[in-house]
Structure formats: structure tokens, C-alpha cells
Amino acid sequence: MLLSEVGYARPSSVDEAVRLLAENDGARPLAGGQTIVNVMKARAAAPDVLVDLADLADLRTIATAPDGALELGALATYAQVIASSEVKAARPVIAEVAAQIADVQVRNRGTVGGNVCSNDPTNHLPPVFVAAGASMTLVGPDGERVVPAEEFFLGVYMTAVGPGELLTKVVVPPRDGAGDGFSAITIGADGTCIVNAAATVAGGEARVVLGCVAATPVLLTAAADADAVREAVRAAGLDPPSDLHGPAEYRRQLAEVVAARAVAAAREGT
Amino acid sequence: MEPVTSMHVSVTVNGELYEREVEARRLLVHLIRDDLDLTGTHVGCDTGNCGACTVILDGLAVKSCMLLAVQADGASIETVESLAGPDGALHSLQQAFSDRHALQCGYCTPGMLMSAKHLLDHNAEPTENEIRRAIQGNICRCTGYVNIVEAIDAAARGEVPA
């Protein structure tokens, strides 16, 4: 398909990327391109300039910080995450979830940063990062700031990343005995999520985060047992969307189910 | 660099270096098919779902309709044309597909073959489940997949007449 005409720049440093994003109205970062290229085909967005981050090798790394936190570079691909010994040691749920995203070809190109910045409500990683208490590091013309995952997702396709800002990494704190779990009902194996839930359990308390039921991930806390978690989901008064994959009532029911499953999986991982 | 709407791109495709001036908006699959005239790589859905456009880029299977050609600048690409030998001898995967009737209309086959090659390049002895997951991003509307899975398994186990 022929896309609308677009400008293209491939900066060699984060500073240059930030400058390009700030100076060009309608500039968008290009990571793996597994969302934005299709969005451009559908004419759902028409960026004036794509700032290709491919040469920013520093953003591609996955590392463990001295305090044990897992640092996922924004450009780390799902395939990298799945194969990473650091992820496996620190927060294995992230690798398990990455392995369920789309298909081999998409996992070879799609990135952690692209997943959270596109913030499609059906994406897998936003609930996982909110449950785990991760934070997003943004670099902009005025320097660096850190946004907790809970405050990062603002609306459908909208995040805290402001004009001229670039997500450089996602930092996930060490588990310190906590367990993580994830559960999703999908359209076919590894397909788009109809409802998903991530949970992090520590000391008998669960942080449960539901995806696909609202514009942004919904964080709930409850005692880490199935009845308490189901009650918390019911009490949340969810108003999920209806679509051809299921009416709102079906999603409300599934939300209880996947929340309880995610917490059960998290308890096994403690 | 300041933003440009077209740029000089060099890519190595099937071992041969190509240099072209390419518009930023051009998809990699159109560079391969229309500019380089390598029409084995197919455009099926053009939405990233069907996998008919799958090529191997720097060792990794990708859907070439979901990449801009400029993103492949400097990359090494394998397309379905790389599989058969210079004398036309079929690759073991191609032979297995032929022997086991793993295609009907054949439209998805180039993508299936490249996804299968990517699998066997990384995993010489895949299980049936691993084969099925490896071609999850490739849609076939004719075969029901059974013969495709059998063909990949046969190629992996060397059960293909030379």
C-alpha cells in the first residue's frame, strides 16, 4: 500500500532524537513499526515526520541495576525479552507475557516501548507494568523525568509522553519475594486480548490490574484469595466496551475470572 | 540528519547488494517486489496479519509489509528466491511442501517457507507445537495447515528425498 508522504530521520543519539521530535510538529518516534506502519496504512494517523530510533543502541539493552531493578530499554524487542536471562531472573512473567504477543514476526520487531506508548487498551504489557509497580523514564528538551506506570497510561492511545519527549526505558523494581501472574482470554491462541489481568502478590496482598475493560489499565487491591479478588472486581463497577467479540456483561464476567487466575498464578510464583 | 522524504538505501538481498533511492513512505515489500523485481514475496492482506510477505531480515523473520524500506537500510535480507539452489534444485523445505501437498493455491507458500526456514535456523528439532507456533503469523486459507506442519516436520527430520 502507498502511504501518505512522510518525512524520515534517523538520529544517532537520544539528544538528537529529542531535538527532532521537539522541532517538528507532527513528528512521531518509529521503533519496530509494528503498530504505527499499519496505523498509517489505515490513515488513522498521519505523522509528518518519523524519527527512526534504530541507531540508538543504548535503548536496546536489557540490564539489571545494582539495586536489582530490571531495566528494559524502550527498543528491546519481545523476542529479546523472551530470550533474556535478566528478565527470567528478575520478573519472569514479563517474558511469559511477551511470548503471547501476536506472532513470531511481530515479536521479532515489536518493542516494549512501542507496546506501552501505543497504549491500545488490549495491549498485554501495560497491566503487567502497573501491577509490578514499574516506572517509565522519559527524556525531553528539559531533561529526564520518571513517571510511575500507574500515571503513565492516560487514555486510549494516550500516555504521559509529552510533545518532544521520548520513552527511553521501563524500570521494573526487584520482586523481593513478590510473585507475578498473568491471565488473558484471547481471540485464538496468542491473539488479541478480550480481557486480560496481571497480578503481583506480596505478603498476602494482591495488586490486580485489568486490561481491555476501560481506556486505561484498572488497578485494584485485594487480599490474595479468589473470593476477595472477585469481590474487588465486582465492587469496581467496571463499564467495559461491547464489541463483536463480546458484550460488556461478558467482559465483566471474564474480568473476575482472569483476575482470580492471575492472582492464583502470582501466588504460585511467590 | 534533518528529515528527508526520500533517501539512498543499500540492502543485501539473497547475497546481492542493491542500492536504490527510496521514498520514506515506501514499504519494504514494494522495494523487494517492484524495485528489485523479486516477486516471490507476496502481498496478501497488506495489514500485517497474513504473513505472505514474510522475509528474513538480519536473521529474523519479519513481515515486509510492516517495515518501511528505509528501515532496512544496511540490512541483509533473504527472500523465498534464496531457497532453491542455482541449478534450480529445491530446498528441503520446498521439496517437503511439494511431496506432502502442503500447498494448494500457493499464495501463502513463500511466507510459510520463510517462517519455516526461520524456525529451523533457530531450532533444528522442533516439536509439532513449536512448528504450529512458528507459523502462527502465516495464514493459509486452503490447506487447514495439517500438511504444512507435516512438511516442516519432515524437512526438519531430513525425511525428504535429496
Image: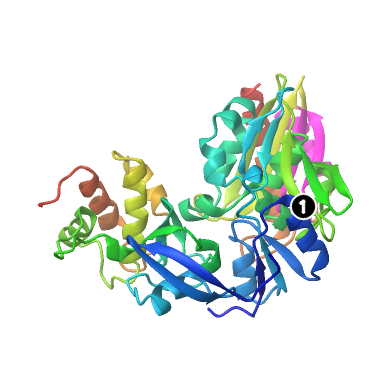
Q: Is residue A264 above or below residue B70?
A: above
Across and down, in percent, residue A57 comes to 61, 46
Across and down, in percent, residue B105 comes to 28, 73
Instruction: Give the residue displayed 86% in from the left and 47% down from the top.
Output: A143
Across and down, in percent, residue B49 comes to 49, 64
Query: Is A228 part of what is drawn in magenta?
Result: yes
Q: Which corner quadrant of the image does residue B77 belong to?
A: bottom left
Q: Is mark 1 on a helix, strand or loop?
A: helix
Q: What residue type is labelled 1?
A: Asp
Viewer-nearest residue: A46 or A156: A46
Task: Count the labels in the image.
Answer: 1
- In this view of the protein, can residue A119 be seen by the observer? no
Q: By what rule are the colours in the image chosen?
A: rainbow
Q: Is residue A54 left or right of residue B162?
A: right
Query: Is B70 part of what is drawn in magenta?
Result: no
Q: Which residue bears the numbered disc 1?
A: A15
Instruction: Give the residue displayed 35% in from the left and 67% down from the top.
Output: B108
Q: Which corner quadrant of the image does residue A46 belong to?
A: bottom right
Q: In which quarter of the image is the N terminus of chain B?
A: bottom right
Q: In this view, does A230 lie to the left or right of B50?
A: right
Q: Which corner quadrant of the image does residue B129 belong to?
A: top left
Viewer-nearest residue: A187 or A9: A9
Q: Give the range drawn in magenta.
A: A206-235
Instruction: Give the residue displayed 26% in from the left and 59% down from the top.
Output: B83
Outermost residue, left direction? B161
- In this view of the protein, can residue A235 be seen by the observer? yes
Q: Is residue A243 above or below residue A126?
A: below
Outermost residue, right direction? A142
Instruction: Give the residue displayed 17% in from the left and 60% down from the top.
Output: B90
Viewer-nearest residue: A256 or A171: A171
